[in-house]
Image (cartoon, helix red, strand yellow):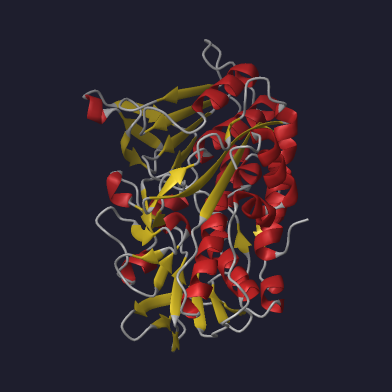
Amino acid sequence: MASVSRRNFIRLVAGAGATSALALAGCKTPTESGKAGGHVVVVGGGFGGATCARYIKKFDPSVKVTLIEADEVYYTCPGSNWVISGMEGMESIAQGFGKIESEGVEVVHDWVSSVDPQARKVNLKSGGSMGYDRLVLSPGIDFRYDTIEGYDAQATGIVPHAWKAGPQTELLFKQLQAMPDGGTFVITAPPNPFRCPPGPYERASLAAHYFKTAKPKSKIIILDSKPKFSKQGLFTAGWNTFYGFGTDNSMIDWIPAPDGAVTRVDAKKKIAYAGGESGFEQEFEADVLNVIPAQKAAVIAEAAGVVDDSGWCPVDPKSFESTIMKNIHVIGDSSISSPLPKSGYAANSEAKVAAAAIVNMLQGKAPDEPTYVNTCYSLITPEYGISVAMVYDLVDGKVATVEGAGGLSPKGADHSLEALYTRNWYDNVTADIWGTGT
């Protein structure tokens, strides 16, 4: 992989789809011999779960695969910042499950209320239960509301997080539309680890693009729980070019930890209080306040008993089987897979590794040596994109980056082309997962 240039790798990922990228990285798929059947239940129809369900069925059609997802339409977090900034409508990030069903996966729209690992069954909110030979959990994230005083699930109706795409996305979009010219948009960025590390900064970028064209007197303040962030140099260079970052007239202000660490909010008054940890608390009044809290594995992962003291799920990276509970695999944002980030594309890659491993394990064989990939695109304007790409393999039982593979957008990159790749990546990865992209 190290012999493949970053430019060619990015071009392949954006233009040829996720399957080709994994083939390039050297991901093995199960052999056709030894089909064993069995029943795999997958919980969560997002980037990880839908991929895993679809690929288990591709790898071994004799396996019965049931995908349980509460929503009939799944809205993706990648692309949601496009909606929040008015670039696209909600329909642009809507994904259905018809293609997956047509390929033989049973899709059940319901909630899993509990898991019985000893009996190997899941209990459904609508009543009844479903047995499994292997269970895959890809439930995404939940929030640590207790880390910010004054912020809870009820407060999200006034102060949205918009970190789960859907009604929260629409709410934040409407608030930004209604904000007066000259208003202040305050975003609070969470501590690591969290879903989509570049996400808050892309949100600020595209909101600034919207303000520059529609509300040019407005201001964006990012209150950050961290001293640095993903793709920071690329973001700040773009902010400087388009939004005056680093000057007296900057549309975007970034306040890092400890001064930017938010400890409490007044949701009704839309005030964030930051810097308490540094001994000097400052008050930030907002016309629109977007609080993105600290995160943890989703509740169903806790109910299944696969969460450790970190709030996340330790797994064997060779198969993504829980190291706490046998026959349960955890993929995507809920898993501990560092240095793989909690991103949609990493979840897609993890899901394929897990799918291949599960088919092998059902056939009584050991999982193959895996390879993983991730590419993350961000838009600073609709025509200016930046990216990071990386290939990973397994070293001494742990995920490790492959030296010389991937990297950041280089100096002198064609950022308009990277913006095009951003759109192509989204179309191709959603086609790979749900069969609904272009």
In the picture, measured across the screen, residue 113 lies left or right of residue 231, that is: left
**Residue 272 visible within the image:** yes
Q: Nearer the viewer, residue 256 or 366?
A: 366
Residue at the far bottom: name it: 128
Front position in the image: 295 or 344: 344
Q: Looking at the figure, which quarter contains the C terminus?
A: bottom right
Q: Residue at position x 28%, y 50% from top?
A: 146
Toward the left, the furthest residue is 279
Q: Is residue 87 something that shows in the picture?
A: no
Residue 190 position, x and y percent, is: 39, 40
Residue 83 drawn above or below residue 249: below
Can you give x and y, in whole percent of width and height, for residue 296 in the image? Answer: 36, 54
- On screen, residue 293 versus residue 281, left or right, reads right
Of 85 and 384, nearer the camera is 384
Q: Is residue 411 above or below residue 438?
A: above
Place of residue 304 in the rendered image (x, y in percent of width and height, measured from the top left): 34, 72
Q: Is residue 320 above or below residue 408?
A: below
